[in-house]
Amino acid sequence: MAFGCAALAACTSLVPGYADPALENLFNAERGFARDAYLHGIRASFLRHFASDAIVFQPGPVAYAEFVRSHPAPADPLATLLEWGPQAGAVARSGDLGFTTGPTRISARADPAKALGYGYYFSVWSRASGEWKVIVDAGISQASPPPQEGAPNMRVPIFPKAEAPLTDAQRVVERERLLALERMPRAVGDVPAGALAYCDLIMPSTRFLRKDQPALVGKALAASIAAEPAGHVEWTPVDGVIAASNDLAYTYGTSRHSISATAPVDGYYVHVWQRNLEGAWKLVADVSLPAG
């Protein structure tokens, strides 16, 4: 395995947390979203808290507005109970972009003690309209309740090279640079000499979500990558946005995971990128979604 993952596995799993008003404000927006789902139903709450151009995965990326139009409203909007809350997230220094993630539980309101399903949600939020709205929504299912992680990881992007906000033209240039970085295939498992390693993109706080697996963070993520058979992952981005402060970004698209002597596995992904102390883009969150 590449030295990068071995070194990361030796690190602490999370950097020390600290309270941050901007992140708490976003968490409160998430809590209000969940409260509205309880009071008014899932569909009404999603329409209220999603941006007009929000993207959801069904299983690939589709416009939520189109998805709603193609699916009739339920006869009883309160029959299904969806519960969730934020465990981790980050907000750009410019306050225009952020993400939240945490466990979900679904049940029938008539019998809330009996869970019908579990999972993790993952939401990218935009404040372009003046208030927080979900711009990308992705989630993974779990066969059993996700483990409780305790206090949220109150960590926000730290990029020491603070500059004036990017102009629209500069954001286009920076976006293309990030997408070019993402298009480079990354090796996993036993990384050949000279190959670009997936581990080079992760940090001690990187969070990885995959169907029917616990959320992997820090040392657990590095150990999981190290244990994989030799192979590589390819990402083909569809779209992405960079915060005005150039310290946080999201991308999404299609993925292909290739392992020696087996057929490639295709799927979708959502990434949140954060600049590290040296100014390099690193993954702060990687959501791997199945193709079907």
Image: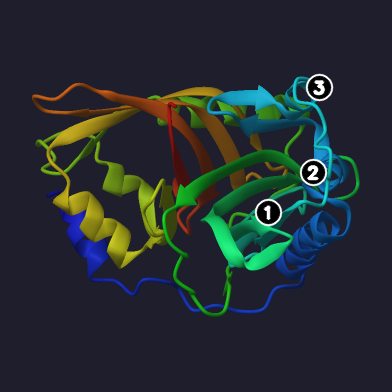
Q: Nearer the viewer, mark 1 or mark 2?
A: 2
Residue 158 visible, this angle: no
Residue 144 position in % (x across, y down): 43, 61
Q: State the SS at label 3.
A: helix
Residue drawn at x 56%, y 34% is 251
Badge number at residue 69: 3
Return the residue at label 1: 92
Q: Residue at x 53, y 50 (%)?
A: 274
- Res 238 visible: yes
Viewer-proximal residue among 260 and 291:
291
Query: In the rendered structure, which disc, 2 or 3, sits on the residue that comes first in sequence?
Result: 2
**Is disc 1 surrounded by few (<14), some (14 to 19) or many (20+) residues within 10 Å?**
many
Q: At which x and y percent is residue 259? A: 17, 30
Q: Which residue is mark 2?
A: 46
**What x and y, as percent, mark residue 54?**
74, 32
**Amino acid type, label 1:** Ala
